[in-house]
Image (spheres, rainbow, N blue to C red):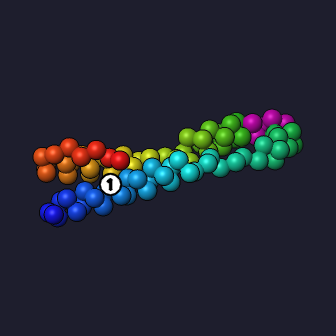
Amino acid sequence: MTKLEKTLIEVKSEIRRQEQNISDKKPHSINHILHLLLSIVTAGMWIPVWILIALSKVTFSFGGAKRELEELYKIHDEITTRIGVRYEIK
């Protein structure tokens, strides 16, 4: 087994681990009661902040893990190209 093939096995293992981590993650919950109270106390001025927080929690909670997974896919593709055989990620 060549060094590239060993590296490919490690990358595939890491891809599986990252995919599992992403599927296991749940978005962070937002304390809507607190934000409602802050909106009432500030006469609605807190509403834009509340909206931004809500959007950022959904958008960015998986962002880092997904970017890392995309990098692993690129490494996988590069190694399989060098080896000359296309291995399926399973």
Image position, residue 86 (x, y; %): 20, 43
Q: Is residue 6 left or right of residue 2?
A: right
| Magenta-tinted stretch | 42-47
- Residue drawn at 14 percent across, 63 percent down: 2
Q: Is residue 15 above or below residue 33?
A: below
Answer with the quarter of the image where residue 8 lies: bottom left
Q: Which residue is mark 1?
A: 12
Q: Is residue 21 magenta?
A: no
Decide which of 59, 87 is in the foreground and name it. Answer: 87
> What is the magenta segment's predominant secondary structure?
loop
- Residue drawn at 61 percent across, 48 percent down: 26
Answer with the quarter of the image where residue 44 lies: top right
Image position, residue 25 (x, y; %): 57, 51
**Quadrant of the drawing holding the N terminus:** bottom left
Q: Is residue 44 magenta?
A: yes
Q: Is residue 18 left or right of residue 36?
A: left
Is residue 47 something one can see in this rendering?
yes
Image position, residue 40 (x, y; %): 86, 39
